[in-house]
Image: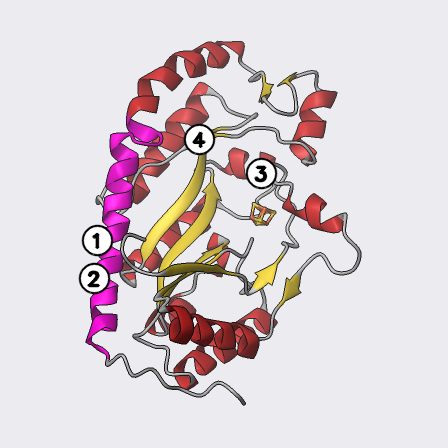
Amino acid sequence: MGGFPTFPLLASRGCARRCSFCSIHTFYQSAPKKVVRVRKPVKVVEEMLYLLQHHGVRVILFQDDDFPLWDPAGRRWADELVGRIYDAGLVDRMIWKISCRAEYVEYDLFRKLRDAGLFLVYMCLESGTEQGLKVLNKEMSVAENVAAVRTLKELELNVSYDFMLFDPSSTFESVRENVLFLKNITGDGRAAALFSRMLPYGGTPIRDALKKEGRLRGDLTRPDYDFLDLRLNEFHRLLTPTVRPWIHRNGLNYLLDCAWDEFTTVTRLVRVWKVPRNIGGRCNR
Ligand code: SF4
């Protein structure tokens, strides 16, 4: 985050969900004990306060696989986190980003989080079609994805997301549906149209399924697969060099997305600058 001391932090690790393309569950399952571990809010806030006081960190990037908001216990955890952020005097002094599933996004909860410093929400939306969400085992609906984006925009929070224009169930029709979905959520210019193709990484259920179907291609380092409609292989091959210059790395879309993020982040941080640098706060209850 240009010019502002920024630091990654974990409030939890692991994810209990089983998205078919994701190896996180498999990865954490290979270690003994719990797949998901959540830190006490008091410890998280102590660390935030330390980073602010000793290193001048103003922007925290929570790198949790799935920020722990998934059930009533998660909501209580979030309430306690917010309370401790207020108690520690961190509101308007630090801002923070989280990654989470779209179905957790509720207006009241996220308004509370926003008021306590949340500025950016990264969600793995993945697909704008019901069939795509099913194949990816997202256990959620297109409507939930759309509602989450709408709520975050209403709250004037920055929205970022992961989206797979192509997945193993793709057809020409589903690609069209996905493009319309992207247009729907980005048409107002408040988020970039970012997309990729699902790749069957090692340790994922979808890789095993593609292997069984005889559609797996490439190897562990360059995983690939055939679409059900082989004409889509050719379409994807032709499309990639066309969109790459404006959607990848230094492409126009990517740069505009970064510029928008920087602008909205700086806007939030201006409030931070107005606060005296005499940083106090208590975080010891
Ligand atoms: S994609 Fe996200 S929600 Fe799904 S298993 Fe991986 S971390 Fe969990």
Disc on the earlier residue, 3 or 2: 3
Label 3 to label 2, Cα distance in Å?
Answer: 38 Å
Left or right, residue 166 beside residue 242: right
Residue 245 drawn in magenta? no
Q: Which residue is mark 3?
A: 134
* Residue drawn 50% across the image and 46% down it: 141
Q: Residues within 10 Å of mark 1 (few under 14, many from 20)?
A: few
On residue 263, the disc is 1
Disc on the earlier residue, 3 or 1: 3
Q: Which residue is mark 4?
A: 196
What's under tag 2, amino acid-wise?
Answer: Thr
Image coordinates of residue 42 in percent, x first then y, are: 54, 79
Q: Write down the region rendered in magenta.
A: 246-275
Residue 267 drawn in magenta? yes
Label 1 to label 4, Cα distance in Å?
Answer: 25 Å
Label 3 to label 1, Cα distance in Å?
Answer: 36 Å
Q: Are marks 1 and 2 in contact (CB under 8 Å)?
A: yes
Predominant SS of the magenta segment: helix
What's under tag 4, amino acid-wise?
Answer: Ser
**Label 3 CB sits under 8 Å from any ligand 1 atom:** no
Nearer to the camera, 285 or 214 = 285
